[in-house]
Image: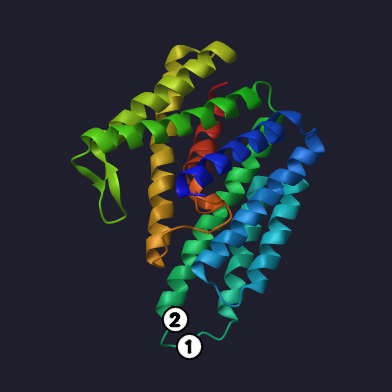
Amino acid sequence: MNELQKRIITAVVLLLFSIVWMFCLPEPLFTYVTALIGFLMTLEMLRLLGLRPVWPYIAIAAIVFGLLASHMALAHMFVLCMALWMLPFLFSGQSTENLKFSYQIMLASHWMMLWLVLFVWMLLQLHQQANGIAFLCGAFLGVWASDIGAYFTGKKWGRRKLCAAVSPGKSWEGFAGGLIAGVGIAASFWVFTIHMDWYVALFLSMVLVVTGVVGDLLESALKRSVDAKDSGISLPGHGGALDRLDSLITAVPVTGLLWMAVQ
């Protein structure tokens, strides 16, 4: 089986899983599965960065996402996560020689963990909102359309690098193509399904695409900091879960918070 076949099969499986996850699971089960997804992405991130000792971070992640599943307030979750995440590093007996690198890796994992907590919390919040599932579908479709539009536009017309040090394959031309595709799909979906005002839909879809690109670049920077090509191997042909969800991890929370604020 070649790489393209692997990518297609994995994409179909992921699409079917996403449909069942979003539309078919009853509320308690959706909450537990979503928290589990956040926990598994955290395990992938810990493996990618090579934090040592790893077991305290796994335990902290299990506590955090378990409390998220019990609907603990976001502010309390952030304070708890920020306080606990430092402890394994402080008491791990770091040597002077590797202190600087270890501290940078710990901070990178801390930053990523907070985004994962916010991402899972926002998914849980939106899933319970009126029109929240439709909003999430529009956000997912918009980010996917942006990725596809950026890829084909950049491949054909890409000349000027968007952020060469982090992602040499991305170009400003690709960004423009992705912006047009993502805004067109997300805004149209929201206008026709939840009757969002067109100017609100345009604004939110632009925020969606831009924050999605930022999330993609930040995850790429995380991988480059440890000289890794992919975040993991859990998705054949696609790398890891973080590779596929990097744009959504930032785009969904930011856009979702704005949508809830303007309703």
| Residue 233 placement: quadrant | bottom right
| Secondary element at image label 1 | loop
Residue 261 located left or right of residue 67: left
Residue closer to the observer: 189 or 255: 189
Do callouts 2 and 1 mark residues in contact (Cβ within 8 Å)?
yes
**Quadrant including the C terminus:** top right
Residue 221 — which label?
A: none
| Residue 172 placement: quadrant | top left
Judge whether 198 appears above or below 244 on screen.
above
Residue bearing mark 1: 95
Q: Which residue is at 55% across, 60% downward?
A: 45
Residue bearing mark 2: 99
Judge whether 30 appears above or below 136 on screen.
below
Identify the image's colour scheme: rainbow, by chain, secondary structure or one colour: rainbow
Question: Label 2: how many residues lie within 10 Å, few (<14), some (14-19) or many (20+)?
Answer: few
Going by the picture, which residue comes out furthest to the left? Answer: 159
Spot occupied by residue 48 in the image (x, y as percentages of width and height): 51, 65
Q: Amino acid at mark 1?
A: Ser
Residue 134 located left or right of residue 231: right
Gap in Å between the C-alphas at discs 2 and 1? 6 Å
Q: Which residue is at 65% across, 31% downward?
A: 126
Q: Amino acid at mark 2?
A: Leu
Whether residue 245 is visible to the viewer of this picture, yes or no, is: no
Residue 13 located left or right of residue 6: right
Q: Which residue is at 29% across, 32% downward?
A: 153
Spot occupied by residue 234 in the image (x, y as percentages of width and height): 58, 55
Whether residue 110 is visible to the viewer of this picture, yes or no, is: yes
Judge whether 70 appears above or below 263 on screen.
below
| Secondary element at image label 2 | helix
Spot occupied by residue 66 in the image (x, y as percentages of width and height): 75, 54
Spot occupied by residue 254 in the image (x, y as percentages of width and height): 50, 37
